[in-house]
Image (tube, rainbow, N blue to C red):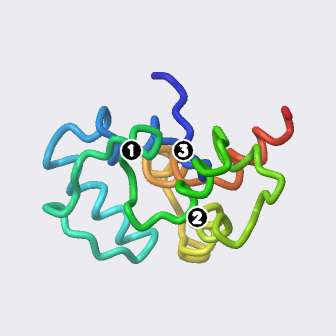
Amino acid sequence: MELIISKCGYRCDLCPAYKTNLKSDADKLSMCQAWAEYFGSEVPPEAITACEGCLADGGDPSCTVRPCAIERKLTNCAHCELFACDKLKEKMNFVEDKLKDGIDIPEDDYERFIKPFLGKDCLEEIRKTL
């Protein structure tokens, strides 16, 4: 699959809610269970819909990062001179801020439910190439 990086550094191509990855009610249920276990989220499976991603005018409608990056005509926030601004910090540090301390995460769960949201790591890797 093609690498798809959102404005905030999330990996849409890896996200379990991304349109090509969300294929069944079982996918929705496993995603909800994992998010509850690792992030304390209380999203019911019926509330999950396939995400188009913020690059295709989808994603979280309450996101403040996407409109800012679009206004600045940025591919993503790694290209911004104000990198790691307050708008970005919440999204960029999502995993670190929400992940329960000391929790043991099986490798498969890490790849499916944690890695897509390592925005900070993704953006910092991109910045190294600029």
Q: Nearer the viewer, residue 12 or 52?
A: 52
Q: Residues within 10 Å of mark 3 (few under 14, many from 20)?
A: many
Q: CA distance from mark 2 to mark 1?
A: 18 Å
| Direction from residue 123 to residue 42 in the image, left or right | left
- The answer for how far apart the CA atoms under marks 3 and 2 are is 11 Å
Image coords of residue 61 (percent x, y):
37, 61
Q: Which residue is mark 2?
A: 91
Residue type at mark 2 is Lys
N-term mark: 3 or 1: 3
Q: Position of residue 65 (x, y in %)?
A: 57, 60
Determine crowd level at label 1: few under 14, some 14-19, many 20+ residues with C-alpha closer than 10 A.
Answer: few
Looking at numbered disc 1 in the image, what kind of residue is underneath it? Asp
Secondary structure beneath dot 2 equals helix
Looking at numbered disc 3 in the image, what kind of residue is underneath it? Answer: Ser
Per the image, the residue denoted by label 3 is 6
Would you identify the image quadrant in which residue 87 lies?
bottom right
**Distance from the alpha carbon under mark 3 to that under mark 1:** 11 Å
- Circle 2 Cα neighbour tier, 10 Å, few/some/many (<14 / 14–19 / ≥20): many
Q: Secondary structure at mark 3?
A: loop
Residue 5: image x %, image y %?
56, 39
SS for dot 1: loop
**Mark 2 or 1: the one toward you:** 1
- CB under 8 Å between discs 2 and 1: no
Contact, mark 3 vs mark 1 (Cβ under 8 Å) = no
Quarter of the rendering occupied by the N terminus: top left
Seen in the picture, residue 36 relative to 69 is either above or below; the reply is below
The answer to whether residue 35 is left or right of residue 12 is left
- Seen from the viewer's position, the closer of residues 101 and 94 is 94
**Camera-nearest label, 3 or 1:** 1
Near-viewer residue (93 or 31): 93
Residue 77 left/right relative to 112: right
Q: Circle 1 is placed at which residue position?
A: 57
